[in-house]
Image (spheres, rainbow, N blue to C red):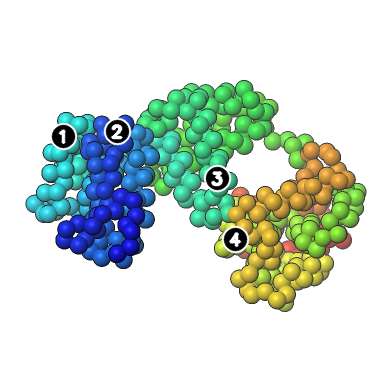
Amino acid sequence: MPKLPAYVFRRANGSYRYKRNVPKKLVGLIGKATLYRQLGESYAEAMRNLPKVHSEIEKLFRDEAHMPSSERALAIIRGALGSEVAEQVLAGQVVEYSQEDYALNELAKEIAGKLSEDIVTQIYTGRLKQPALTLQKALGEYQAYKTEDAGESRELELRVARALKDLGAAIGKQRVAQTPLGEITRADANALRDYLLERMKPSSVHRYITVVRAAVNYVITEHSLNIPNVFNGLRIKGASASVEDRLPLNDHDLAMVAPNFEDDPVAQALFVTLTDTGARLSEITGLEVRDVDLQQRSITIRPNGIRQLKTKGSQRTLPLSQRALELLQGHRRGKGDSDPIFAEYSRPRGRDAASAMMMKRLRRSITDKKLTMHSLRHRMKDKLRNTGCPEAISLAILGHSTNTVAANYGSGYALEVMREHMEKVWQ
């Protein structure tokens, strides 16, 4: 018989069980000194179930002190009676006088007097109280929604963590974690703004609060809430957009920096494609082989296994200049349709690595901080405007989410309409 892992023991009847002592500081919160979980009838079954069971218990110990009462009740049920009973409670499917109902009754009696009456009642009845939708929960739901793509998840995770920390410092951790969202006021939003202004420039504060504003907008929509988003339209003096915030690269700048990218095939392909499409860097570093159509001389920017897109309007098909097509083709050869064109930047945080590499080359010739790689996108916008491109087509080319007719541009004749206007820029 193999040596059993920590916390696992074999019962007299041959089945396997998980046994874990509750840390002393959490006994009063959990209501039990020891937690047991059935792992399975055989060693193989037990080993399959062990990682999930161990993870659930660890999460219970780690998060217990910060859980709403309903989550604490569910965690105690899961820890004491297992996932199957917990899932029945979560779904509201516990049948009265059933084996599960009796087990919940006994568990509630065991912890009565050790935990709050609220938690005991939820366990006894098998009915969870709907937790309040708070700022903390809103940010968590928004993060879960936005992080389908692993490459983006770490960056958003850090932004959400910073936002929660600063919200806690500005209006109090208790208010962030427990106050219903409908009771968060404009004064709270202003308090966050003022707290951030103590260490950030106004323009940085404006960008920083975006994640909080977006999270609240998301849950208001998803939960059909009839409440205002108090983070919308915050007055941040000095943070309004200005043509001076980010300058486009002019023709002289472009001629000066282009040679800095020519000594590396990847850097050159990225630079030329960004210049001739006005696309975002992440959109180009995330291209797969199948996204480049040699016959149509175009690229299709869409969500894939490498990265998601910034907005729904970002999904589009763009004409390619001949030079961009040739450079991209050099990185497609010998690869399958689903392979990344720029493999070195298809990893998590690959976009950041690509940005750092490109900026290093740009800075060899240009030191003005208002000129960055994103200035190529501003350049395309200005060039399209100055050559008489209609605004609707310009929005479609750039993939702006405010474009209401972007879906009309992307294939067939519309692709040629975009090419007609982009060729004026390429010249």
Q: Residue at x 45, y 25 (%)?
A: 172
Q: Position of residue 184 (x, y in %)?
A: 43, 29
Q: Earlier in the sequence, mark 2 or mark 4?
A: 2
Q: Position of residue 427 (x, y in %)?
A: 87, 61
Rendered image quadrant of residue 296 = bottom right
Q: Is residue 187 above or below residue 360?
A: above
Q: Residue at x 66, y 70 (%)?
A: 289
Q: Is residue 380 left or right of residue 149?
A: right
Disc assigned to residue 156: 3
| SS type, badge 2 | helix
- Give the alpha-carbon distance from disc 1 to disc 3, as whole Å: 41 Å
Labels 2 & 4 near each other (Cβ < 8 A):
no
- Give the alpha-carbon distance from disc 4 to disc 1, as whole Å: 51 Å
Q: Determine which residue is flagged by label 1.
A: 112
Picture quarter with the N terminus: bottom left
Q: Position of residue 133 (x, y in %)?
A: 37, 38
Disc assigned to residue 24: 2
Of badges 1 and 2, the one in the foreground is: 2
Label 2: few (<14), some or many (≥20) within 10 Å?
Answer: few
Disc assigned to residue 302: none
Q: Is residue 231 above or below residue 224?
A: above
Quick check: can you spot residue 11?
yes
- Give the alpha-carbon distance from disc 2 to disc 4, as whole Å: 45 Å
Q: Determine which residue is flagged by label 4.
A: 306
Labels 1 & 2 near each other (Cβ < 8 A):
no
Instruction: Give the amino acid type for the residue marked by disc 2 in the picture.
Output: Lys
- Give the alpha-carbon distance from disc 1 to disc 2, as whole Å: 18 Å
Q: Is residue 171 above or below residue 229?
A: above
